[in-house]
Image (spheres, rainbow, N blue to C red):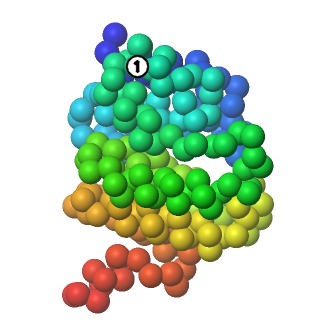
Amino acid sequence: MTILEEAILFATQVHSGVVRKGSSVPYILHPLEAAAIAASITEDQTVLAAAVLHDVVEDTPCTLELLEDRFGSRVASLVAAETEDKRPDQAPETTWQLRKEEAIRHLRQDSRREVKIIAMGDKLSNLRAMHQALIREGDALWTRFHQQDPLAHCWYYREVGGTLDCLRDYPAWQEYWHLYQQIWPGQPSPLDEQRSAL
């Protein structure tokens, strides 16, 4: 069994019974989609395994130590780079801004290309789900989140997207910013810069 196949089986097990926020869609489809997006950029099986596992420490009882024992230090390090400190002793709505600022700062400071690839897979998958929900539900979409201000989410995805410029040559980058403009029309993005340069 390859490291990717083992990661898929493990993630399916630990995310079992969990669904995406505000839907009945099994949660496992998100990390699988994140890995599929990452696979459009790299064939590195360890990176793809980490993409599949990117939420297991943040959202399940799994620890980084367990991941390292089972999948090695590189996978554990890549997953750690994607893992927020959720501060379980505090209400999530009160820590949202701090957690997102920390995530952006860590993503900016981590120069590893594979970290950017996994972040692209994760966040593009989120944008796809948000765009589909916005079409179905309209602004009711935002009530499913701890942070219910759509402009706060706009700020977060704009800042995250700004750290992914090294992936500009890939279709995933173009799709990311296209969906960003669909979800938050009128907000500036690098696609505006591309059009103005033509």
Toward which corner of the image does residue 167 lie, by quadrant?
Answer: bottom left
Q: Position of residue 110 (x, y in %)?
A: 32, 50
* Residue 155 in the figure: left or right of residue 34: right
Residue furthest top in the image = 1
Q: Is residue 25 left or right of residue 52?
A: right
Query: How many marks overall?
Result: 1
Where the N terminus falls, by quadrant? Answer: top left
Residue under pointer 1:
68
Foreground residue, 106 or 3?
A: 106
Q: Nearer the viewer, residue 49 or 63?
A: 63
Front-most of residues 181 and 100 = 100
Taking the spot 69% from the left edge, 36% from the top edge, the residue there is: 19
Residue drawn at x 26%, y 46% is 112
Tell me the kind of residue under disc 1: Glu
Residue 188 image point, x, y percent: 44, 82
Q: Position of residue 42 (x, y in %)?
A: 24, 40
Query: Could you say where residue 90 lies in the image, as x and y percent from the top left?
Result: 75, 46
Left or right: residue 181 versus residue 162 is right
Q: In which image quadrant can residue 85 be found?
A: top right
- In the picture, residue 16 is in which quadrant? top right
Viewer can see residue 158: yes
Indicate the quadrant containing the C terminus: top left, top right, bottom left or bottom right.
Answer: bottom left
Query: Disc 1 on helix, strand or loop?
Result: helix
Residue found at x 52% / y 84%: 186
State whether residue 9 appears in this view: no
- Label 1, residues with CA under 10 Å away: few <14, some 14-19, many ≥20: some
On the rendered structure, is 3 left or right of 62? left
Residue 59 sits above or below residue 148 on the image: above
Residue at horizontal 73 percent and vertical 57 percent from the top: 94
